[in-house]
Image (spheres, helix red, strand yellow):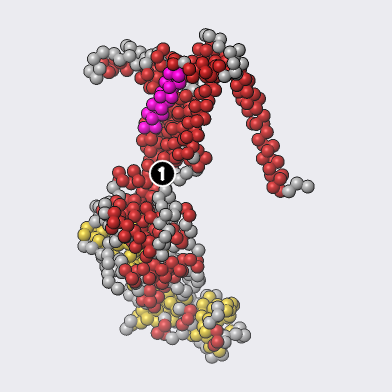
Amino acid sequence: MTARGQSVRFAGISRSFGPVRALLTTDLEVSAGEFLTLLGPSGSGKTTLLNIAAGYLEPDTGRVLIGGRDVTDLPPRRRNIGMVFQNYALFPHLSVWENVAYGLRARGVPSAELERRTGAALELVQLAGYGGRAIRQLSGGQQQRVALARALVIEPDVLLMDEPLGALDRQLRQQVQLEIRRLHHAHGRTTIYVTHDQEEALVMSDRIAIMREGRIAQVGGGEELYLRPRRAFVAGFLGESNLLRGTVTATRDGRAVIAVPGLDRPIEGIAADGLAVGGTAAALVRPECVRLTHAPGASLTGQLVERVYLGELVALRLRLPNGLIILCRCLARDGVRGGDMWGVAWEPGDVRILPDDAPPEASTKIVGQ
Amino acid sequence: MLTAAASRRLVTGALLVPTVAFLAVAFVVPVGILLKLSLTEPAGPLSTYADILGSWVYTRVFRNTIVLGLMVTAIAVLLGYPTAYMLTRLKGFALTLAVYGVLFPLWISVLIRTFAWILLLEKHGPVNRMLVGTGILDAPAAFLFSNTGVLIGMVHVLLPYAILPIYANMLRIDSRLMLASDGLGASPWRTFRRVYLPLSMPGVGTGAVFVFLLSLGFFITPALLGGANNMTVAMLIENLVNDRLAWPLAAAASFLLLAAVLALLAVTARFVKLDTALEAR
């Protein structure tokens, strides 16, 4: 994979809409050829940041650099970007061919080269032979591919995509995700991708920036974010999680202990940065790290309230004595069935103690399905 | 027993009955009588049509009417397009004010507005005084009883009919298409020419057809502001009925105007789809 496209750097970017601070001061660096996803709930500022990269929005403060060139004051047409909009924004009065050729015509590309590059772009998205069609004759998935071809044909320094798969049904979405990933691997074009779908982010990205309330909560590879989240919000947003909220009682040698109201036993785990004794924190235990044992002799017991068979896995919900619900996933063949009371256990190495910044109503629920 | 579809058709039909009945009595029957009237000249059933088409004077009136209509249409669309665009950019109180500004003239009688233009445009009226006073003209211009006066008056009356369909069309253009064009490297002028203008053409077509059709039947404004050289078909028909009592000839002139309108509509329908223009995006 050779990197085509340029690095993108956001330096001290912020933006407000009237009294609403959509984006607090943000720094982010996307390297050349990288696929970076801005992931977050709606209103987290991810689309604002994308539009600032494209030039559709001006930042209140800070600079945007593409390939080291300061483009903050340039309009979109002078930034050499490829933008894919949520509902594609294809030109309804132009044919598929003319839609794709649009950016080349605007650049005054000679006709022989224009023919060649437009044809190649349509071939790339497997729409060769569709050039003469009208946009409204295409299915949603085909329109999505035309939008992609139109953005790629101009060989942009950076490809920007704003929830481009939002309008597709689930099955098609998964197909197109893999398609976009394949294209990115083949061409290595710097891509900034906006979505609120964590699975989509995990499938496609080199790195994910999780955004919340106008700031980036954490940036990293999918595995890193899942295994080593730095804040309870990140843990809750990516994957399913058990977050047991309490008060930090001790920190030592990279480990921390919290007391959870209603549990006799303190919980110990690997400490994240930013913990203080006496402060609030949450213990993260992923459902697949929860082990069930036979109840007699266990230090923590739970009552089995739900068992959902998922094929190779079963998803279980257990109620702890203090009323908290613990999610557990285990292999179906390990045969957790029958019985009402189970011992609940985990390895201390599988627990992370995180500063608690998630809204309380999200605690120990399945977040993000 | 009626099927659901049949009873739905019956209800639709019943809802249409009052309008159809009214139009039949008030429109179709009189038009039929007029058609019969145009064919009842003693010299032969089609002699009235032959008289009009064979007369240099009458055909010139028809040509005048159509040329005047085309000029009014062109000016109204050229003035209406930027006005409609401006309306799409306004919000809140400014928009309300501007929309009322466009609609307000429609609420005042054409007669009153035309008399107002006579006062404004007369030889020693405010317009001439201003033009001469500022040195733009050396001597007062003869706006009245000329093509200029008729054009000014008719454009003023018909402008809202150009603005409103264009505005309605522009509102439905997806603003992200312009962003997309910008992002693809197109200059603002190119974005306008390749995206905005083509997408607003259905509205322009609808507005132009409205203005043109209305201008063909215009009577008061050309009659009051125009001179003898600017006779339109409507004035001719009035003259034939009231002064010469030549009813069959007037009826034939009406039908020739109707035929011209239908022919022009048939041609424009190839370029402008009136039904889709109302829902175009």
Of all residues shown, which one is farthest toward the left? A69
Of all residues shown, which one is farthest toward the front? B44
Residue under the point 32% across and 11% down = B124
**Toward the viewer: B70 or B94?**
B70
For the residue marked with disc 1, what is the amino acid? Leu
Residue under the point 38% across and 55% down = A97
Residue under the point 39% across and 67% down = A180
Percent position (x, y) of residue A107?
A: 27, 53
Of all residues shown, which one is farthest toward the bottom? A297
**Toward the viewer: B174 or A220?**
B174
**Toward the viewer: A229 or A204?**
A204
Disc 1 designates what residue?
B199
Residue A92 position (above or below residue A13): above
**Toward the viewer: A217 or B18?**
B18
Whether residue A366 can be seen here = yes
**Is residue A16 shown in magenta?**
no
